[in-house]
Amino acid sequence: MLGVLAVIPLSFVFVFVLDGRSELAVRAGIFAGLVFLGGGGLCFVRSPGARGFGIGLMTGWALLSITTAGVCTGLQKFIL
């Protein structure tokens, strides 16, 4: 559960704070890479808490992408 909740502040850092400083694909790639490499790496740790956090990171990214249509994860431009 904690991993799912940790994705939300990470999305603000990578997508909204870096809004005008880099391309959308670069931000989305860095964020997805961090989440899936970090979460995947934590899945191979023997600690059950670390495994749960890693799976939570990856699940949280997917849920946030689905529920916000990719806006909060950098998959789609922020349109107002």
Image (spheres, helix red, strand yellow):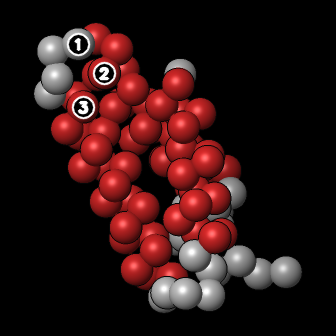
Q: Position of residue 62 (x, y in %)?
A: 49, 47
> Which residue is labeled 2 in the image?
50
Figure quadrant of the C terminus? bottom right
> Which residue is labeled 1 in the image?
47
- Please report contact status of discs 1 and 2: CB closer than 8 Å, yes or no: yes
For marks 3 and 1, give the CA distance: 9 Å
For marks 1 and 2, give the CA distance: 5 Å
Mark 1 residue type: Ser
What residue is drawn where x is 49% and y is 47%? 61
Secondary structure beneath disc 3?
helix
Q: Residues within 10 Å of mark 2 (few under 14, many from 20)?
A: some
Can see residue 10? yes
What residue is drawn where x is 23% and y is 13%? 47
- Please report contact status of discs 2 and 3: CB closer than 8 Å, yes or no: yes
What residue is drawn where x is 24% and y is 31%? 42
> Which residue is labeled 3 in the image?
42
Secondary structure beneath disc 2?
helix
